[in-house]
Amino acid sequence: MTTRAEALALLEDRMKDCQKCPLAQTRTRVVPGEGPVDAELVFIGEAPGFNEDRQGRPFVGQAGQLLTELLQSIGLRRQDVYITNIVKCRPPNNRDPMPNEIEACRPWLESQLEVLAPLVICTLGRHSMGRYFKMSISRIHGQPAKFGDVWVMPFFHPAAALHNQALRPALFADFQKLPALLDQARAERRAKSTPVKEPPPEPKQLSLF
């Protein structure tokens, strides 16, 4: 039987040969994602940048450094979470991913999430947020919603906070909400996995007549 770790590794390996959209012609390396298969938190960014394209790893530039800082602010390390992007290849000149590119990568992301089965999904930026929410990120950032059995929390992208320092306090404040949400998600999953014991049957009355 294939383990979850083996299934995730096979999936990531298959992505490296993907030719489903034009980004395959301009990329240096595919960036599947990285992190433990049992991660409770999954972060979904938008697309790899220059450094990610060269190294094949997500969030390794300045935005990645800020993400590490944000995680540390709530007592987590980068290796505690799984990090990926909604698009696995770098768009030319770091432009926004196009709808057809997002759609081409959608099955990869769905398969990753199916294997990972996280408690909480954290979207970074409006493109990954758009997978779940149809409102402006400025209106709903830091406001979690439940989709099926999974909580989704939308955040500003760390790169946006680097370009606009006014977003930085809101980003850090939103991250402070994650521990409580994670505790709630853990409790809900425990409750769902705990079998409900049926009450014992009523004793039968013996008739003496």
Image (cartoon, grey):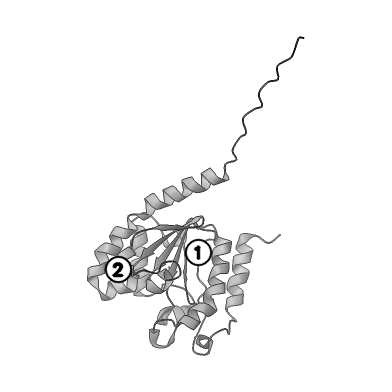
Horizontal side, residue 178 vs residue 24: left or right? left
The furthest residue to the bottom: 25
Q: Which residue is mark 1?
A: 35
How many badges with numbers are in the image?
2
- Relative to 24, say whether 119 is above or below: above
Dot placed on the residue nearer the N-terminal end, 1 or 2: 1
Q: Quadrant of the C terminus?
A: top right
Secondary structure type for disc 2: helix
For label 1, count other residues whose C-alpha is less than 10 Å away and answer few (under 14), some (14-19) or many (20+): some
For label 2, count other residues whose C-alpha is less than 10 Å away and answer few (under 14), some (14-19) or many (20+): few
- Between the residue at mark 1 and the residue at mark 2, the CA separation in whole angstroms equals 28 Å
Q: What residue is drawn where x is 22% and y is 69%?
A: 166
Q: Which residue is mark 2?
A: 138
Location of residue 189 in the rendering, given as x and y in whole percent from the top left corner: 52, 48
Of residue 2 and residue 20, the one placed in the foreground of this image is 20
Location of residue 112 in the rendering, given as x and y in whole percent from the top left corner: 55, 67
Location of residue 23 in the rendering, given as x and y in whole percent from the top left corner: 50, 86
Q: Quadrant of residue 58?
A: bottom left
Q: What residue is drawn where x is 33% and y is 74%?
A: 159
Of residue 63 and residue 110, the one placed in the foreground of this image is 110
Horizontal side, residue 130 vs residue 141: left or right? right
Q: Amino acid at mark 2?
A: Ser
Horizontal side, residue 57 vs residue 171: left or right? right
Location of residue 129 in the rendering, given as x and y in whole percent from the top left corner: 41, 69
Of residue 86 and residue 129, the one placed in the foreground of this image is 129
Residue 89 seen by the camera: no
- Relative to 114, say whether 189 is above or below: above
Q: Quadrant of residue 68?
A: bottom left
Residue 163 seen by the camera: yes
Which of pointers 1 and 2 indicates the residue nearer the eye?
2
Q: Quadrant of residue 152?
A: bottom left
